[in-house]
Image: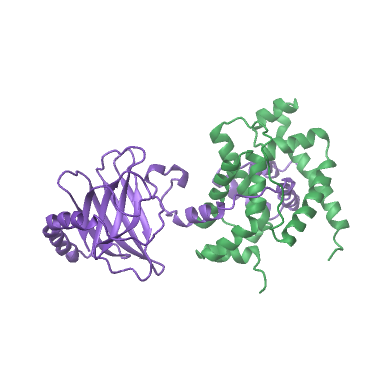
Chain colours: A purple, B green
Amino acid sequence: MTNMDCDHLVDYLNGTLSADEIQLFEQHLKTCTECQEIIEATGELPYLADPIEPPADMKARILSNVFEEKPEQDNPPAALDPAMSPIPLHRKKSKPNIWKPLIAAVFLASLLGNAYAFLQLSDQDDAPETAIESIELQPNEAFAGTATAAMIEEEGSLNLVVQADQLAELDASQVYQVWLIKDDQPIPAGAFSPNPNGEGASYYQLDADSTEWDTIAITLEPQAGNELPEGEIVLSAGI
Amino acid sequence: MEKSTDTSLYLRISDQDKEALEQLYDRYEKILFSFLYKMLEDRDLAEEALQEVFIKIWRGKGVYDESKGKFTSWLFRMAQNTAIDLIRKRKKPTVPIEEAAQTASNDAPVDVQVEWQEKQDQIQTAVQHLSAEQQKMIDLFYFKGHTHETIADMCDIPLGTVKSRIRLALKKLKTSLHGMQERGAYDD
């Protein structure tokens, strides 16, 4: 017990040693049976806990957060702004409605701009490897925000990621809703609410057989979860 | 198929094998969650701590090798340290709450439940061999994450002797645990 290294055992268990001290103590540990045995005995203490049933959906939450963590990012996921989280949506079959004239008008107005953006994009070689297609969305006349959409391939599945900024604040129930459109038939493809900095993002996993779209649009919806657009189009682009 | 050892799972995790991490998660979710809940007395905090533990493992913060003893000792120590960090960061008084804690359900694998029960019996008996003061000190030190000052106050002992008394309590725990394990070592 006079050994100064053994003296560090309690601090080691307590997590109060510096990185250097931990290294030194672990060196000591290799040769000190008594400290080893005390640590092993301490390692049995958690079994004193009475079994508690974990929440059923905890595993999905934790694993997705663990795998999402970028090594260079030091913020724990809890620090992320919840207002920026994508709102999950279920895809359902939709029927055509008022969508057609709306999209036609906006699409026409922005067609030239899109064509130009596309040409520029195709000249860029420094796009991220995983993004196989990236598009600037064009705002309608009255809208100040901007958005970029990208198709990202990750582990064989195709994802639509939309990032927007300079967004106006919304009422509590409103959301920005992303739509993918083919032959005038829109399907919801992610939604977001802006954070206090006016930024928003959504992430939507596409079905394997659904790569053929002609238009992407963002509308301002009175509430989340609409299967067909009710609000006006604020941003759009041809694909 | 043969069950992977913890160490082999850990090595695969070092190579960023997601499936291995999931297996490790499944294996220890319940004991870790229950342990963290015992420490933090709050389900949300317990989940936060558990997530932090798996982020540390996934990112390779803190490295395990067999010279550090049993994998579970290492894993539990990391969980315990993470919970202590949370306790100290929040400075939230840990008032014991009689939260409706659901008891063990039967959907956990039977061998896991049996092993837990056996270990719990053992460690409980070992703890009962300690004096009341030693039991209290282990609780304050290990589960509540109190500082030496608080422990000195709460146990009414001089601050200068807290560390050596904790060590003594843990040493006694080790001795009685060993005695029992030797007696029970013929079960195989």
Q: Residue at x 44, y 55 (%)?
A: A68
Q: Residue at x 23, y 50 (%)?
A: A233
Quarter of image, res A101: bottom left
Between A3 and B144, the one lying in front of the other is B144
Q: Residue furthest bottom?
A: B1
Between A210 and A8, the one lying in front of the other is A210
Question: Image check: A137 left or right of B78?
Answer: left
Q: Position of residue A92 (x, y in %)?
A: 39, 60
Q: Position of residue B61 (x, y in %)?
A: 52, 53
Q: Residue at x 48, y 56 (%)?
A: A64
Q: Quadrant of the N terminus of chain A?
A: top right
Can residue A28 be seen here? The reply is no
Between A86 and A173, the one lying in front of the other is A173
- Taking A188 as reference, is A85 above or below it? above
Q: Position of residue A205 (x, y in %)?
A: 38, 61
Number of numbered discs overlaid on the protein picture:
0
Quarter of image, res B152: top right
Question: Image check: B127 left or right of B26?
Answer: right
Q: Position of residue B160 (x, y in %)?
A: 70, 29
Q: Quadrant of the C terminus of chain A?
A: bottom left
Question: Image check: B183 left or right of A218?
Answer: right
Can residue B28 be seen here? The reply is yes
Between B38 and B169, the one lying in front of the other is B38
